[in-house]
Amino acid sequence: MTLQQLRYLIAIVEHGSISAAAEALFTAQPAVTRAIQALERELKVPLLLRSQGRARLTSEGEAVVQLAHRVLAGVAAIGESMRPKDATPAAAARPVRLGTTPALAIQMISALSPRFARHLPGITVDVVTFPSRDPIFDALRAGEIDVGLTDLPAPTDLEMDLLRPHEVVLVSPQNVDLPDPLPWELLDGHPMIVPTRASPRRADFEEFFATAGIRPAVVLETDERAAWLAGVAGGLGSMLWYRDLLEGFDAMVRMRSFSPPIHRTIGLVSARRAMRAEVRAFYGFARRINATVFHASGDGRGEARGEARGDGRGDGPGG
């Protein structure tokens, strides 16, 4: 029996499945499975009941987990007792200051940040929102934030780490009759909710509309994303947004892919300077939890846009 086996068992209980535990521990799923099977063989009792990808404890497993918590607490106490009495406590880690846009902050706060907190509970992430990409880049250069989470590409004087592409979809009221997937040309004359003319994001929209040769009917101009969703749910018009950020709103709105599809790549951006240990830990965590991570050397613009396209058509406006 090993301490690692006990840690794996506790992680399965905390995360609900072997696959989720393996992901949280940055360990291959087969390794976790083999470790638990070896523990069950040694104890000669089943510890887990597996069904439809989930795992729950048997009565024997519950007893083992209770004891495992005591064992691991005891191990931690041994290490603490060996620390010299006059040793200076380690300095508290400074928060990682992450700048992002309001739409991506939803994903950061609801998904990435909690998982990071479970993995490295001693490090916190302070999320700072900016109205668009350019202020994020300025804050990075000034040292006001440690890392940016935004759509790419970024200016050539900054470093980029590309995360996975996000699909841009048309989000419409439930009663709108349009095909799925939706040809771009059907947006011509369609009622749309868009950013204000003064915002940098509006320029992205106008570039996309001009490239596609369409002119939607603008029914609302606002930079408040909550107003966008309220306008769509209320039947005012449609909007463009990332599919991933609309999970849970299916009962309020209807999402449609485009034909050809539109993708935009989200990535991490940092200044070209030495990183604090906490920031390096956050970067490493973000790289690991994404199925595919690309590092853009040089200016990175060609690579960023190429990965974002997927279908060879190019980027579109997003969140």
Image (cartoon, helix red, strand yellow):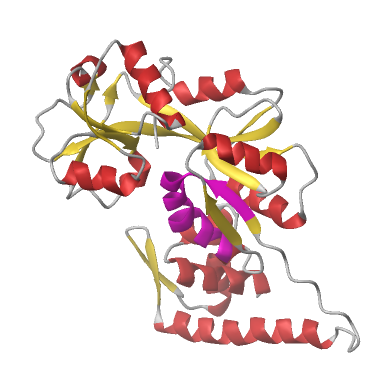
Numbered label tally: 0
Q: Is residue 71 above or below residue 198?
A: below
Spot occupied by residue 25 in the image (x, y as percentages of width and height): 59, 60
Q: Is residue 112 magenta?
A: yes
Spot occupied by residue 230 in the image (x, y as percentages of width and height): 22, 48
* Span highlighted in magenta in the image: 97-117
Residue pictured at 36% horizontal, 20% vertical = 206
Q: Main structural element of the magenta stretch: helix, strand or loop?
A: helix
Q: Is residue 5 above or below residue 108?
A: below
Task: Name the residue nearer the viewer: 205 or 51.
Answer: 205
Instruction: State which quarter of the image contains the N terminus.
Output: bottom right
Q: Is residue 108 magenta?
A: yes
Residue pictured at 76% horizontal, 48% vertical = 275
Camera sees residue 268: no
The furthest residue to the front? 198
Camera sees residue 167: yes
Residue pictured at 48% horizontal, 52% vertical = 108
Instruction: State which quarter of the image contains the C terminus.
Output: top left
Task: Name the residue nearer the viewer: 134 or 297.
Answer: 134
